[in-house]
Image: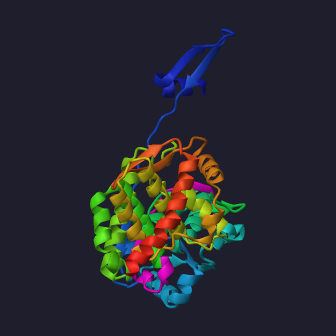
Amino acid sequence: MENLIEASASADTSTKTSANTRSVQQIRQSFAVNFQYDVVFTRNTFSLSNNSLIDMLCPIQPTTKLLTVIDQAVEKHHPLLINRLERYCQHHKIQMLPTLSVVGGEACKQDPEIIDQVYQAVEQHAIDRHSYILAIGGGAVIDAIGFAAATAHRGIRLIRMPSTVLGQNDAGVGVKTAVNYHQRKNYIGTFTPPHGVINDFNLLISLCERDKRAGIAEAIKVALIKDKAFFSQLCADSQALAKFEAKAMENMIIKGAAWHLNHIATSGDAFEFGSARPLDFGHWAAHKLEELSKHELRHGEAVAIGIAMDSIYSQLIGNISQYQLEQILNLLIELGFDLQPQALQLLDIKQALNEFREHLGGKLCITLLDDIGQGVEVNHIDESLMLKAVGILKQLTVEQECALAS
């Protein structure tokens, strides 16, 4: 064994001398792993002529199994979906296992029994790492089932099928999985890329207006920190987006997802080993607001408030102009976001920043705006100035809502 170690790692083995003159042998291990997965935008995924799913499962082997976990809300609004999936699997000779139906929303991420249901199914049906779990549902279900898939057998191939706007343009296309713990959002999780993502626009039809609107916040976020032209397009399409018109919504989803994927591929820190998280613009307050509202606030609704707060703060420190700030706030209000929820009155800025610092790994790094379309990371927030930003938010909301209504 010693000869094997010396031979395989001789180029990277060094000898150090410590204070007590004893030699220390060191092997520095280094390797790279290439991740690749497809994000498909389609309709009628389980139509026999649609190859989106079967292409992700190929090559089908005799031992290949498919475990489907579906959000109860999706199952309720699309009662024929599982029947169509069964016919699809039969047609393509896919071994489909009994479907698991789970509660959606943050309740899914709060309940450890849901994760255990997946583990039990993996054990009962002898699902191995060459089989697949198909998660159909909102961002919370995608997160929770993704965590279960990532930790069963140290990783079972996961295909995500997000059913919400937020899931399709943000949460469902990235590399994170998570569940909540002791009311702390995303406290337990992994960085695990999916095997593939299918964004079926037909799943969005049955969403309520709040869920449709909430997903737009993540597109606004990524436009503000990445793409000025995209933000201008969102402003130009604001009336169509406020009415949830299909063309405007689908363009927004595709562009938002593309920027999310671009950041993962090009940031140099896909698994967030550092403290900078540009895609978390507006999130330090959003996470806390969700908790304070006992998750009555949708994630996207809380993000919209966080975007408003951090945009005002960015203007107060001179990074963006008053006109640019008004563009941002007008867009949020015109789309129908409530920027004054009750939870905002309960927000302790110092506590929220400290908890976000812990979430980041000990060093505070907050993304602000340096311009529309350009984010900047800062390591300090003036708490008194942020408190002023919250006060301005309350005042501006009333004034602008009146102006927009007139």
Above or below — where is 2 with respect to 192?
above
* Pick the front one: 177 or 84: 177
Above or below — where is 336 with respect to 84?
above
| The residue positioned farthest toward the bottom in the image shown | 80
Q: Quadrant of residue 112?
A: bottom right
Residue 96 point in image, percent of width and height: 53, 78
Residue at the spot x=53%, y=66% of the render?
A: 394
Asked if the magenta segment contains residue 334, the reply would be no
Above or below — where is 20 with respect to 290?
above
281 lies left or right of 362: left
Q: Is residue 34 visible?
A: yes
Asked if the magenta segment contains residue 191, the reply would be yes
406 lies left or right of 22: left
* Pick the front one: 3 or 385: 385
314 lies left or right of 3: left
How many numbered circles does the render carry? 0
Residue at the spot x=53%, y=19% of the render?
A: 14
Q: Is residue 148 visible?
A: no
Residue 117 point in image, percent of width and height: 68, 71
Give the quarter of the figure containing the C terminus: bottom left
Q: How is the image coloured?
A: rainbow
Residue 333 point in image, percent of width and height: 43, 73
Above or below — where is 233 with respect to 212?
above
Residue 350 point in image, percent of width and height: 63, 50
Give the quarter of the figure containing the N terminus: top right
Residue at the spot x=44%, y=75% of the render?
A: 401
* Pick the front one: 264 or 151: 264
Boundaries of the magenta span: 187-211
